[in-house]
Amino acid sequence: MNYEAVIGLEVHVQLATASKMFTRVAAGYGEPANTLTDPVVLALPGALPVLNKAALDQIIKAGLILGCSIAPVCKWDRKNYFYPDSPKNYQLSQYDQPICLGGAVEIELPGPARNVLGEHKKIPLTRIHLEEDVGKLTHGAQDTLVDYNRAGTPLMEIVSEPALASAEEAYAFLTSLRLALVHGGISDCDMEKGQMRCDANISIRPVGTTRLGTKVELKNLNSISFVRDGIAHEIRRQLAVAAAGGTITQETRDYDGQTGTSQSLRSKEMAHDYRYFPDPDLMPVRVDEAWLAALRATIPEHHFDRQRRFMADYQLPYTITSVLVPDRDLADYFEAAARLGAAPQAAANWIANDLRRELAAAKLPLAASKLHPAHIAGLVSLVESGVISSSIAKEVFVTMFQSGEPPAAIVDRLGLRQSTDTGELEKWVSAAIAADPKAVAEFKAGNEKALNPIKGAVMKASAGKANPQRVDELARKLIG
Amino acid sequence: MADEIIHQPAARLAALLAAGKLSSLKLVQACFARTRAVDDRVQAFNSCDEAAALAAAQASDARRAAGQARGPLDGIPVGLKDVIAVEGQPLTCSSRMLANFVSPYDATVTQKLKAAGAIPLGRLNMDEFAMGSSTENSAFRPTANPWDLTRVPGGSSGGSAAAVAAGELPLTLGSDTGGSIRQPAALCGIVGLKPTYGLVSRYGLAAYASSLDQIGPLARTVEDAALLLGVIAGHDPRDSTSFQAEVPDYRAGLAARKGPWRLGVPKEFFGAGLDPEVSAAVKRALEFYRQQGCEIREVSLPLAAEYAIATYYLIATAEASSNLARYDGIRYGHRSAAAKDAIDIYTRSRAEGFGPEVKRRIILGTHVLSSGYYDAYYLRAQKVRTLIRNEFAAVLRDCDALLSPTSPVPAFKLGEKSADPLAMYLTDIYTISVNLAGLPGISIPCGFTGGGLPIGLQLIGRPFDEAGLLAIAHAYEQAHEWQHKHPAL
């Protein structure tokens, strides 16, 4: 029997806010243990939560980016369970009325080749809700230490429909989701810092059937690659169980990305009763159209829409857009250069290749670059108008990257202007013809390529300043 | 001097302070002396930081000498129920769980008291985590009724009520979730006001039932309650359930708001279980108002009468089961010495740290919220609560206030009801629906039984109309002498 996999993802993403979700204490990472606390975070007697509006703004923005419908009223529920990382022993969350419903994540699957656009699909979302993050436990040999710095950080849970069919699709889902959220300023989505965490629900069923099989929840998938590898591993495991005539048991499994193995954490029988009820300490929040409109105005263009626009409007090749678009700053930089009048394809090439190479070599972020879009536009225009050659332009680029000097000034200062002085050109071309009678003879015999060494000699004699087009014309004329 | 001070209303003490005839230091010392003389019998105090109170009194006197007194309560000691946070002071909730806990922060009401120059003085005994009606559920010791030391002071704010009645403190704060200010005020012969839900910030009040809890004043006179309410009321950005209401001058409103009023008398609040002497006293109060020209009309609150107690014990215990989950022995509070792992810390620390009534309510509330029972219990109770609120709203459309007994019985004997939780719960039968409806309610003295026990009259007002409620209560008080009687201790 042939089986297919059905995968649903639950993604937790910390929202980028200055302070925690229900108190003024700063939200942060890497601070000394238990310094980002106060009576509310520590759940001291009498402490009460007050909603940080920025957290709600952020999740609504995320919902708008992903095309969710936004609930008109945002309410809070208590999820009751005892665990030492949860100071109140209940978590403020949203149970039956999540703030975002529906929506989808557009994904791109790998194309037939690296430089070919792959298939696009929309993976529907069930819901997105807001909750508070918990603290962090560190287990030692004798005891366990708890750090509440993370506790109370706003955390959204994005739940997809069971609509993913492969590990590759899950990988593409997370890659695209991450880009959308990073571009929207919703989160940095740094999985190493725990800002984005993913659990996967995986089942298999005979091809052609629609009923979902018994699902296994895979936890601790702490990088996008581990998500892909873990899911692929779990699908293989389930297929092997099925092939051996066994049945899949509903359970939660822990995937170890280092060893590529998983082990059972707990079975379904131990499921919790969280005793959800509306939090009496918080009031429901009404989300009106004006609020939504204000947030909608801050949302950037979706990365896939932008990529399609780059290919259509600027005629950029797919490969260049896949370099520019994922880096929002780089894509903005390109568009700024294009707005300054630079020929788009040339500007895109400079940015995607030369600029990125120089930044990487200098270990600089784009924001720290002395080279601005105006430099790129200037350089492209110097080449287009024939003032300098492409090879000279490469030198000018490196110089201006280091100094920030405008390209025209560099060209003037170093005397790099392409020579269009016919007398000077004739002198160089004549000398080159005289120096290489063999090439001249071959060219006359019909070998077009024989002209190359002559042109090369001219370029060398002129230190690159000779206009290649004019040299070609002159050489033909003088030989002919 | 001390005898002249100990039973004086706060407003009178404020006048003496303002006139330079009394210093805050002397006043505080008089409170200490009275407490030393009587509290081994009354047992209203859990603890008292005398040094802090003396320093605050001296600071108040210095302000006044410099012409910078902050208002009528500057220099007046105010006792706090041991459930309201004061920075650097114990916050025990009369529980073994928090027996050694010291609050690192001030409740909003504490900050407001300090800002007004009032002196937080003493941590007052209560039923553990405010669960009870007699203060016998204190994990430390019961408080006695100053009028009869063999009887309870009521609860859960029993220490706050007894301290005022016994002359130990002129003013105290309590908290009221189902009657916990009004019922002990009635049983101790003083004034107790539960404000409208949302008028006073709950920030820094260790929560019992978040949707019902309110902090309020206990005082010797209606005027004193008005003064203290004026200090603690007002919107607090740290409490999301705090209302954006204007805080009027409640004292000025006492004389300004004049009758005659239309008063409703819920007929169901005079039924079976009501002590005849209590009933007679309340009816005499009703006659007084009638003679003053008030329109007295019988009204009916059938749902409140029938379902308030059941509704309350579903909602309050559900919220409590979650609110008290934080007391787990992990971060603070009692941790069992015998605990071996995290689960063990929870179960042993909570088994050792909580008393039987607290455990009973946590178990009940946990059950109420359980999967499969939520709809039948919690959700239905919330719907009934809405009906009860609507019922009150309808009646209050045509009445300025409702009038009833505060407690169906006067102070009962220590131990009399402690073995019978249901009998204890019924002592809140007239107060509990007021919390469910979120309304303001005040208890004022309206007489004594033949045995010399105080009787309380409850007045229930419109939401955020404390000014009107206080004026109605004040009119009765001015025409009577009950507040001038004091227990012989």
Image: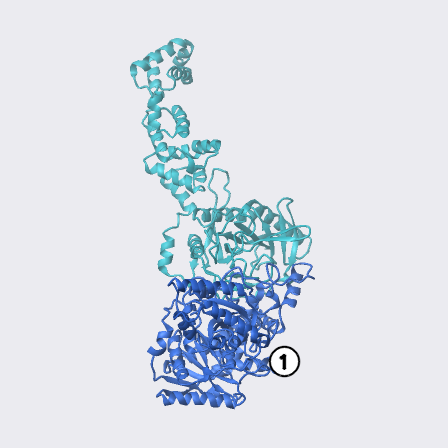
Instruction: Work out whether residue A269 or residue B32 is closer to the camera in this orientation and state it.
Output: B32
Q: Which residue is mark 1?
A: B419
Which residue is painted at 38% across and 73% down in the image? Answer: B250
> Is B387 positioned to the left or the right of A271 in the image?
left
Residue B127 position within the rendered picture, expressed as x and y whole percent measured from the top left: 57, 73
Residue A266 position within the rendered picture, expressed as x and y whole percent measured from the top left: 65, 57
Instruction: Work out whether residue B433 or residue A124 is closer to the camera in this orientation and state it.
Output: B433
**Alpha-carbon neighbours of circle 1 within 10 Å: few (<14), some, or many (≥20)?**
few
- Is residue B301 among the parts visible in the rendering? no
Which quarter of the rendered picture does the C terminus of chain B lie within? bottom right
Q: Is residue B77 above or below residue A438?
A: below
Residue A303 position within the rendered picture, expressed as x and y whole percent measured from the top left: 43, 45
Parent chain of label 1: B
- Is residue B421 among the parts visible in the rendering? yes
Q: Is residue A171 above or below residue B351?
A: above
Name the kind of residue labelled 1 in the image. Ala
Supply the letter of whichever chain is blue: B
Instruction: Work out whether residue B366 or residue B277 is closer to the camera in this orientation and state it.
Output: B277
Supply the letter of whichever chain is cyan: A
